[in-house]
Image (tube, rainbow, N blue to C red):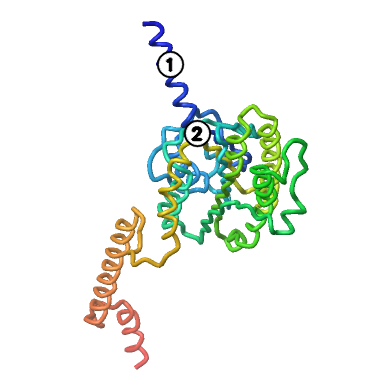
């Protein structure tokens, strides 16, 4: 009996480790504070990001790790770096939480865009960029990190190093597409996929994976510093290290992504506050119209001799002058 209980505990721990990644808040402004909150479900990540940007969450989340200290100085940008770690831990500086992978980060982005994009009262940029191997780019070749164990002439080492070089260069595109200077907000998702291939090839405890994690940690720190300078510290920088669920759902997501930017004949999506605002404006307009109409009719049918104080005050003076 004891052996069965121990076997069940081990099995549950293995299942939880397979479907539990990491979420690290590398930087957050003083108005958004992250404390102890336990494991965060990926299905609640969009509400956490939306609340950080100043929106009211679509549903109450049981996760209590986020505290909004001031609702009047919301961040102007949120940057999420998705990392396919293959089970590796990056161990960044910042607040780190367990991430239960009950949905993909791609689904989190699309839900954030569809639900909160329609609520935005000012222009909001939603951009998802997949960091790819651009080995033919001269800038990539000149900025490949120096290595001791990894070999850029071998695979998957070369792909990983190329993506690490492209990560910071791609992050710099935010300055060109940002809407923050015009009063908007930016929501940018970056995806790094090559670390999982390094883990798959060499194993978790290998020197190659250790060096790859160190390089990735350095590049993420550079991206965080750049975003802080670009948005003047009014930015939320988060990295999500995912494990197995992304590989399972990738083939399904590719079908949906084909229609992301296509012009479909779909009705405009309105927020849940639309009916209340519509009724308030409609009935207030009707009441004001009736009030103006009644006032105009009363003034038009007024008897100058009886109802107007103007005529009462000027009438004796007119007789005296005569």
Q: Earlier in the sequence, mark 2 or mark 1?
A: 1
The reply to whether residue 102 is in sight is yes
Residue 189 x %, y %: 55, 50
Q: Is residue 56 left or right of residue 185?
A: left
Residue at image x 34%, y 93%?
322
Q: Is residue 32 left or right of residue 220?
A: left
Residue at image x 60%, y 51%?
131
Residue at which label 1 appears: 9
Q: Camera-side residue: 156 or 292?
A: 156
Q: Camera-side residue: 62 or 282?
A: 62
Which image quarter holds the N terminus?
A: top left
Residue 206 x %, y %: 66, 29
Mark 2 in CB contact with mark 1 (< 8 angstroms): no
Q: Residues within 10 Å of mark 1 (few under 14, many from 20)?
A: few
Residue 48 x %, y %: 48, 41
Q: How many marks?
A: 2
The reply to whether residue 73 is in sight is no
Residue at image x 54%, y 52%?
187
Residue 178 x %, y %: 60, 60
Between the C-alphas of marks 2 and 1, the distance is 20 Å
* Residue 157 location, quadrant: top right
* Callout 1: SS: helix
* Callout 2: SS: strand
Task: Pick out the residue farthest to the front.
Answer: 154
Q: Is residue 273 above or below residue 52?
A: below
Q: Residues within 10 Å of mark 2 (few under 14, many from 20)?
A: many
* Residue 174 location, quadrant: bottom right
Q: Which mark is residue 99?
A: 2
Residue at image x 23%, y 78%?
297
Q: Is residue 132 above or below residue 241?
A: below
Q: Is residue 141 above or below residue 242?
A: below
């Amino acid at each position: 009996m004891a052996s069965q209980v121990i076997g069940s505990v081990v099995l549950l721990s293995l299942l939880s480790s397979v479907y539990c990644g990491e979420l690290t808040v590398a930087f957050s402004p003083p108005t958004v504070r992250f404390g102890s909150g336990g494991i965060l479900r990926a299905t609640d990540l969009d509400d956490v990001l939306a609340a950080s940007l100043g929106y009211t969450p679509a549903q109450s989340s049981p996760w209590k790790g986020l505290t909004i200290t001031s609702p009047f100085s919301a961040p102007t940008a949120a940057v999420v770096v998705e990392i396919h770690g293959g089970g590796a831990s990056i161990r960044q500086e910042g607040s780190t939480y367990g991430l239960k992978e009950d949905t993909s980060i791609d689904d989190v982005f699309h839900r954030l865009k569809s639900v909160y994009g329609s609520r935005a009262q000012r222009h909001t940029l939603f951009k998802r960029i997949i960091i790819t191997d651009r080995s033919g780019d001269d800038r990539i070749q000149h900025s490949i990190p120096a290595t001791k164990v990894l070999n850029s002439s071998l695979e998957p080492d070369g792909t990983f190093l190329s993506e690490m070089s492209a990560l910071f260069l791609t992050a710099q595109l935010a300055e060109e597409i940002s809407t923050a200077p015009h009063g908007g907000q930016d929501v940018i998702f970056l995806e790094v996929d090559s670390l999982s291939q390094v883990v798959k090839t060499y194993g978790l405890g290998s020197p190659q994976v250790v060096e790859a994690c160190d390089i990735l940690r350095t590049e993420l720190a550079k991206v965080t510093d750049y975003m802080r300078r670009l948005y003047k510290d009014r930015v939320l920088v988060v990295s999500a290290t995912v494990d197995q669920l992304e590989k399972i759902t990738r083939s399904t997501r590719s079908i949906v992504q084909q229609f992301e930017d296509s012009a479909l004949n779909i009705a405009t999506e309105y927020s849940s506050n639309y009916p209340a605002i519509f009724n308030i404006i409609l009935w207030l307009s009707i009441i004001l119209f009736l009030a103006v109409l009644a006032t105009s009719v009363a003034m038009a049918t007024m008897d100058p001799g009886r109802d107007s104080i103007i005529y009462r005050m000027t009438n004796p003076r007119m007789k005296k002058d005569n």
